[in-house]
Image (cartoon, rainbow, N blue to C red):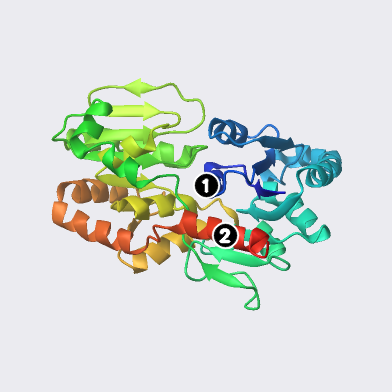
Amino acid sequence: MSLVIAAGGTGGHVFPALAVAQVWRDRWPTVPVFWMGVRAGKERRWVEAAGFPFHGLRSGGWQPSLGWRNLRLAYRLPIAAVETSFLFSRLRPRVVFTTGGYPGLLPGFWARLYRIPLVVLELNRYAGRTVRWLSRWATEVYGAFSQVEGISPSVSFRWMGVPVRFSSEDRSRYTSATAKAYWGFPVESPVVLVLGGSQGSSALNRAVEQMVDAWIEAGLSVLWQVGGREEEIRSRSIRRIAFIEDMAAAYTAADVVVSRAGGSTLGELAWWGKASILVPSPYVAEDHQRKNALYWEERGAAIVVSEEEGETLREAVIRLAKDASLRRQYEEAARNLCRTEAAKAIAEALYQIGYGST
């Protein structure tokens, strides 16, 4: 008897689910958590590093950029379906939890076939395809936003917020000064944290490349997560890193965050109470990042610019970094969008669904 979590593909799907898994392990250590993801996905490293058993499936999702190579799904999906069935018989889940994305699709279908309670968490303002499909028979659908478009009004929906991978101890690990020193930045220099997501964003990186010198000339320091396997660049005013491992140090050091507008990242910005400039990706399904970003902008929690507005982005970063009073307004608005106990609330709800009657 166990909790099965199906999540993968990007950090935005994985890290919120990991936050829930960690709460579950702390509260009910005798009830195992098993993870299902893509065999060759990045999630294996993150999940195993957190100490959870990982079961990789020969799964995948349709990606327009791959063209004819998507035909591999014709043999991968049947194999993954058999693997999922075998794992369900062996792991005997009492409840299945997924944050959407194609790694959650087959476990979600199998939960229905085996009549196992299924809970889905949608992290964006507009539900993705997997969540829209699975919500039809999910026991409950949870949302990072108070309202989620794209799912039926008849679905049992609860606003839970975004489970984050941080704890109260992370807030106290650094001060602003010690965090800046950790990255090698001058303590007096405002820090701009640039996040393109765990896989990076080539378009956002190109935009930042054209304005980073102007930020440095204005007296700012830049901590830049570029994604992929980029070579690290380090100087007194810039750290350019493929993937930031210590995000507590990054968020504590940051005075301004430039970011895509994925639901998981927004949840972290709210939890840390950070002033942000959101550059929503126009390449994602259902244009959900733009919808996320506008939700924040309407509530005074962020400035929203497009990739094409390079001059606007350059000047907005400098203005926000230099104006502490304006920055505090955005920080307070961001904190107002946070549900600090989301991971705990979701873990407790999952336990009640799977084990509450025992």
Give the x, y percent position of residue 307. 41, 49
**Label 1 Cα crowd, 10 Å radius (few <14 / some 14-19 / many 20+):** many
Which of 318 and 133 lies nearest the eye of the viewer?
A: 133
- Neighbourhood count class around disc 2 (C-alpha, 10 Å): few under 14, some 14–19, many 20 upward: many
Q: Of callouts 1 and 2, which one flags the residue occurring earlier in the amino acid sequence?
A: 1
Nearest to the observer: residue 294 or residue 339: 339
* Vertical order, 234 against 276 (above or below): above
Q: CA distance from mark 1 to mark 2?
A: 11 Å
Compared to 168, does 130 lie above or below? below
Q: Residue 164's mark?
A: none
In the rendered image, residue 210, in percent from the top left (x then y), is placed at 34, 36
323 or 21: which is nearer to us? 21
Q: Is residue 210 visible?
A: no
Report the quarter where the C terminus lies: bottom right
Report x, y in % for residue 221: 23, 34
Label 1: element kind: helix
| Residue ID for mark 1 | 12
Res 174 quadrant in image = top left
Counting labels gives 2
Apparent side of residue 92 relative to residue 145 in the rendered image (left or right) = right
At x 48%, y 54%, the residue is 343
Q: Residue furthest front?
A: 358
Q: Amino acid at mark 1?
A: Gly
- Whether residue 89 is visible to the viewer of this picture, yes or no, is yes
**Amino acid type for the residue under numbered disc 2:** Glu
Query: Residue 160, image x and y in percent?
Result: 49, 63
Q: Nearer the viewer, residue 296 or 272?
A: 272
Check the image and report above or below for 334 versus 68.
below
Is the C-beta separation of discs 1 and 2 under 8 Å?
A: no
Q: Residue at x 68, y 57 (%)?
A: 130
Q: Which mark is residue 122?
A: 2
Residue at figure coordinates x 71%, y 55% from the top left: 94
